[in-house]
Structures are given as structure tokens and as C-alpha cells.
Image (spheres, coloured by chain):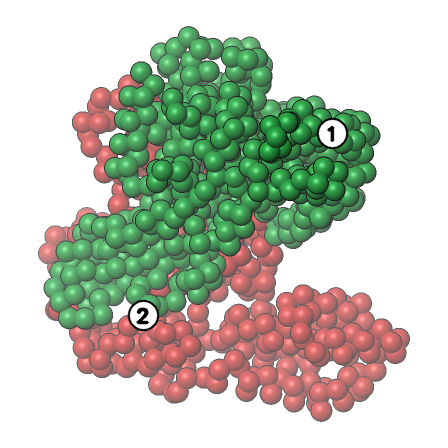
Chain colours: A red, B green
Amino acid sequence: MAGGRTLHVRCATWDQVETFTSRKLRKGKLLSMKVPFTPAIGSAVTLGLELPNEVVVAIDGTVQQASVIEAEGRTWIEVELHGFTSEVVDRIKQMASGMAISPVAAPIIPRKQGPTAPPPAAPRTSTVDSLPQDERELFQHLTTELKRLRQAAVHDVLGVPYDADAETIRAGWMRLIRRHHPDLVARRKAPAISHLAEELTILTNRAYDRLRMALVAEGRATAIGATVSAPPGWLVGFDELASAERATGTTMPPPARGRDRIASIPPVNVASGSGPAVHGGDTFETRARQMLGAGQADNAQEVLAAALVVYPRSKPLRSLYYVAAAVAAIEKGEVMLATSQLETALAHYDQCFDATRILDYLRKAGQHDPNAIRRMFQ
Amino acid sequence: MSYAVGIDLGTSNSVMAVLDRDGGARVLTTPDGATTMPSLVWFSPDGPVVGEAAREGLDHSPDVTIFGAKRLLGRRFDHPDIKKLARTLPYEIAEAPNGDTWIALGSGKLVSPEEVCAIILRELKKTAEAHFGGPVTRSVITIPAWYDAAQRQATKDAAQIAGINVMRLLSEPTAAALGYGAHRGAERKYLVCDLGGGTFDVAVVDVSDGIFEVLATTGDPFLGGDDVDRAMVEQLVRDVRTQKGLDVSSDAIAIERLRSGAQRTKHDLSSTSGATLQISELAQLPSGRAVQYGKQIKREELEQWSAPLVKRLEPPIKEALARCGRKASDVQEILLVGGSTRMPAVQREIERVTGKTPKVIPNPEEVVAIGAAIEVARLEGAIDGILLIDVTARGLMVSMGQSECEPVIARSSVVPTREHRVFATKKDDQTRIEFDVWEGESSDSTQNRHLGRYAAVDLPEATAGDVLVLVEVTLDTDGTVRLGASEMVSGDRLQLEQVFHAGLARSDVVRLAKQLAAQST
């Protein structure tokens, strides 16, 4: 393992593998990501690329760039994967297409205990054989299920689409809980069955919590009952890898839909070497305000949408986006729509002064002069 | 063949129930025919006396008669609540070597709340065995929904000492909804208000299609009927002073007699507007003559005395609704559980806060135990179509050395669940990493409950920061904590050493269980 650190990247589906090889790598070799330590430039790292079929391909690399992100206590690094040879690519493609795995071509380390996959219940054949027939079947069924779900992405665990809304996610969770909750198998004598059921439920609950937190973070759901705050895990998940394509943001409305935005942290500019972006997106905000003052509400909206790709959790930016949407609506004379946008802005960030001010104006004045609103931003 | 029962281990009274073969709930009665047994242990010179019989101990040796041990279960001694409680208890509490609250029985003998609860559970077990005519080894035990991991573990330990295998810890509001028959009803949201002897618990329970989900729980661990009794005693002591010119405030026996008299009067006042408190022998004068004491108490007087306590019902109710983002109008039914909800003032206050007429269950003391009995039947496979989903009441955090606490598992996560944290070595060739596990939400460790300090040992020798230890924190279906650690690069399991541990050690539990079993034969 070249003595360096090992980074695990887990691809749960062949889709993700495809994305990894085609889109995540720049110039076919460069990969950037956030890690919780600061490696020296030029030091060796090994990337353990975990494939959906439990094979881990070890790819050697060298750290090219490293810049510390103070606020997060993490470091953005760029790694040149010189071990990512065309042979390796071919091998991966071969596996993806379901062909026989050739035994040598690249160093394969047997799948070790990945942090996301705690140890399986170590099913021993002797235990299985001593079980009565029906319990044996259940045991085998649960083992297979656990193996399958361990490999699946959170959406696939719950069996919901990538852009599922809160209700769908909840329904998917409920369906699994009804199937696997430990209480349902409590009458079984074998402790191994209860254990498997608990492991499955843990997996289900975690997937549910992750998805819900992602929805809340995106502003697509409010936290009901369980979990509102996300534990800041550090594992290099697939979604944390920088995409080689530059964020094109401008066409994205902030209530994000689509797989790339779920829990993704966009690595703006760091990979391409410019210094860390201004904290909190002040530049975006200033530009958007100028545009609002000039009557270009639509443009302001696009700027803010782009900003939100960089700072998906910034409440001021998100509320300002809705304010811009409201101003655009006022310009078109749609006051009802504007009001609801402003209320949405306040729902996201109750200290949004602009929203309060415009709402007050709309209500008090009983009129909606776009020029008066432009003046507020000048 | 061994049998299983549902147990409501209450702060002041415990109840036990089973489902008959026809599916009907049966509350088991004590040998005296009562459905509830006081959670009371008198450490008499001839050994521990439990339940109704221990009331005698309250009369003449209140310092070794333990009530409300449940409130002390799994609590730190230096917690302000415990300090406050200590002043009002007739018995002494002391700090255990690991900072837990224990009970001092005089002559330097310390006993843990787990042991006291175990003695109560063993008595319940005996009663149940008499009912079944066979051994009782398993049980569902109910706990307040806000119980943290340490308290849940302590409850399990108590059961283990008593020789009972806990099938599941069941949260009381869920048990109440179950006992009320919510699984047979339509989709509903219930607001369960459980005001017992020592605790007040509020929970929003969502029942849909047989799935019981506690959406939010809050509570006041130090509010209950006993507090009303104490408020009454305070007034009565004042009254004795003016009526008889006697100061009984330091006379433990007189206080206990006032307390039990006040409790009877309180019960009467739930159905009548006036009652008389009569104590034939409150105290003895130096001449040896007994002092009699009697007082007419009106319901309004009682309500006036208990008004500050009743006012404390509002915040937990509001908070429970707020936590799950609901309004009182989103709740279809309000269930009143626990003996103290019989007080008309309590019912009025809950109606005022929620704007809804609460449902008064005819047997508010027994409904939780019945729920536990239903859960037993379900786990045995006799009932289908019910699923109980529990969430954590507090978050779990970890820290290393002097660093700030970092969250691992958020509050209100659905259990069972598991999260991990990674610790790196800080020195070259460091072979041991110590970390602490806390319960709470604050980054400041002093605000959190310390669950324990653990050490991952036998790490491979390497440069500082190169050895990464993955610590997995698992909350199981009962809400108790399990830990595991592995070394990240190799994936090898690591040995975890307990440096400090809240609650009883495993070895102590086993030892005490043997000891108690030996005593009862």
C-alpha cells in the first residue's frame, strides 16, 4: 500500500462507477476531495475504489495540492492517480459489464472492513444448520438482504428514487421497518436472527435519517418528529468527490432535484487552484443586490441560484433568492406570487430584512410599484 | 415452561399485567388483593420488606425505607435535581465511587437504586409466579420515554439482578396508547400526559396502521403526586405549629404520618369537595401524652397549595408539541395516564393548555401495565400487526482528551441506529486512545451526562495521525448503548477497555443477581 494513507471511495452502484471514471476525474487522473487530515504535497496515497461487487481496487496516487479549509477543519486535496492505468479502467469496465474477473491485472485488496459497513453477523454454517427449517430460510433470507442493502446507496436501501420527496421516503422506510424490525422476529429462538433483524433495521433507520436530513438541508422538508441535526461524518463518500465539470449552477433552482445535489458539497474553485472563496458568498450577494437595484431581478435570481450551489446551507442567500423571485414576480404584476415567495424567504430565514421590508411595503402601500422596490436595493 | 409478564415499574406504585388466553388483559393482584404495589422497600433488621408491608417501615424507620428509587436510577449525584431531591427525602443518598447516586442505609451501608428496584421486581416476580404456578423469567418493563441510555441500562441491570430477562424496554406513553387500545382504533395522534407519583411525562404518539411512533417526548422528572403530598405536608406542618404550638418539621416520624394522611385526603378530594385529615398520634409530648391532629381540608385549599405544581404541566406539553412541529389541534385524542391525573385541577389545566377535553381512562394506574402485557403477547407472537417505533430522548456525543464534545447520534434518531467517529493518534507510536462518551447536546462536556471513558488499546505502532480508530456507537432497540472499535486501515477489531463507567459494572450485576437469588431461597 505504498506506505501512504488509504482513502476509501465506495461506489454502491455501477452507475456511480461509471460516473467516477467518466466525470469525477479531471484529465483522467486528477481527483479532488475533502479529507480530515493534511497530507504533505507529494506524499503517497492509495485510493481504495470499492465496487458494487465488493471488490476493492487499490489505485496508487500522489498528492498534488492541499489546502486547508479552516472553518471545517478539513483539507481539500488533489490527487494524481498514476495507478489509474488503462488496464485498470478496462478491468473495471469488464466487471461492470458482468464479465469474468481476470485474476491478476491490478492489485486487488480483499474488501476490508469499510467504515460504512460494520461487520456482518458472521453467519456460521454450524448455527444455520442447527436451526429448524423455517428459521433457516428466514436466516438465509435476512443474510442475503443485509448483504444486498449494505452495498446499496441510501436511496436504493429504501427503494425510492433519487429525487423522492419526504412522503415517499417515509413510506419506503415504513415498508422496510415492517419487514425487518427486530420485534417481528423476537419469537424466534435463534439470537442470530434477532441480530440480523437489528442490523437491517439500523441500516434502514440510518438511510432514512440521512435522506431526511438531506431534504431538510435543501429546504424541501421540515423536520417532523425525528432527527433535525446531522452528525458531521467525515467519510469520503461518493458524493463528496469533486465533479470535474465546473458547476454550471445558473440553471439550477435552489430547491434541488436530482442525484448530484443530494448531500453534495460542491468544491468550488479549490481544485482549480484559486484561493478559498469568500466566506458566506458576499460577492454573490453584492452582485445580486446590484442587479435587483437595476431592475434585473431574473439575473439576480440566477446569480443567487449559482451561489446556492456553492453555499447550499446559507440561509441569507437562500432567503435572498426567494426575495429575488418575489421582485421578479412584482415586475410581472403577480403580487400574490410575490407575497408567497417573500413568506417563503422568511420561513427560511426569519431575519431576512429585505423580505420583511418588501412585505411591509406591499401590505401598507397596497400598491406594487417596481421602481419603489428597485430603490430599496440601491 | 416459563412465563412472561408486563411490568409497569412506577416511581411510587408498580403494576403487573398479562394477557389471558382469550386476549383479555388481566392485572395481577398482590396477596392482599391490591392491583398496585407500592414501590417501597423497607430494609428492616430481618431483611428487606417490600410493598404494602413496607409501609410500616415508613412509620417508624423512614431512614431505611426507600421510596421513589426509580427517580435515582442512573442519575449522577452532583446533578442539581438530585441535590434538590436530597433535601426532601427522609433517607440519605450518597455518592457512589463513579459519581452515581446511591442510597445510604445508615451504619455506612450503601445500596444502589438498581438493587432497590431489583428487590421490588423480585417481589413482583414472586407474585406473578404464584399466579402462573410456574417460573417467570421474562418481562417487558416500561420506562419513561425520556429515559436516557444510562437510566435504560440501569433498569435492565435491575431486572437482571432480579433474575428477569428484559424482552423489551417499552416507553410508557406507547404502552399507555397500546393499553388504551389504540391499535384497534383508526389513524390518530395521541397526546399522552402521564402524571404519576414522581414523574410527569408527555408524549405525542402517532398511531397509523398499527405502527406506533413516538413523535416527541418531554417531561418533568421531578413532578408528580408525591410533590403534591409534600406541598400539603409543608402547609400542615405550618398548621400544626399554629394549632398545637409544636414544631414537627424535624420529626421524621411525624412528617411521615402527615404525609400518608395527606395522601389519603388528596385521594378523597379528587371526588369530594371536602375531606377530613385525622391523625390519632402525630407526636408525643415530653409527658408521654400523644398529640392528636385533625384538619378539615377543602378541595379549593388543596388546589391553591398545589397550584405552583400544576402550573408546571404546561411547558412540557407545549414543548412536546413544538418538538414534532404540531399544534394541539393536530392531536385527535389526549390520554390522561397515572393516578395523579385523577385530580380535577390537573384535568382542568391540561384542558386549558390544549383546548381539548382530555380522555379520562377509568383505570389510569393500570393502563401502562396492560400496554406492557400486550407488548409481551406481541413479542411472543400471539398478536400481529403492531409495531412500536422508538426515538432517542437525548443525543450521544464523544470527545477525546480535553476536546469539545462532538455529536455522534442526534436527539430523536430512530432506534436502533449506529454512527461512527474517527479518532487519530496524536503521538508517534501511540498504542492507546482514550475517549469519552457523553449523553446530551452541548459541546461543553460539563453540560452532558458522562456515560463512560473507554480506551482502544493495542494499536499498531506508527507515526502520529497514521493510526485511525473507528469507534462505532450503537443504540439498540431498547435505547441502550453498545460500543465497538476497529482500526481503519486493517479493519481489525480493537479491544475496548472500560476506564470509567456510569452505572453498575457487569461483574457487579452478576454478583448481585447471585446474592439476591441466594437470599430468596
Q: Secondary structure at mark 1?
A: strand
Where residue A276 sits, quadrant-wise, is: bottom left
Q: Residues within 10 Å of mark 1 (few under 14, many from 20)?
A: some
Q: Residue at x 64, y 76 (%)?
A: A320
Q: Which residue is mark 2?
A: A36
- Mark-to-mark CA distance, 2 and 1: 73 Å
Q: Amino acid at mark 1?
A: Gly
Taking depth in this image into account, of A95 and B485 the one nearest to the observer is B485
Residue A166 drawn above or below residue A301: above
Across and down, in percent, residue B497 comes to 22, 50
Q: Residue at x 64, y 42 (%)?
A: B247
Q: Which residue is mark 1?
A: B294
Chain hosting mark 2: A
- Furthest-top residue in view? B133
Q: Residue at x 42, y 13 (%)?
A: B129
Q: Amino acid at mark 2?
A: Pro
Q: How many marks?
A: 2
Taking depth in this image into account, of A95 and B148 the one nearest to the observer is B148
Circle 2/circle 1 CB separation < 8 Å: no
Would residue B395 appear left or right of B187 to someone viewing this image? Answer: left
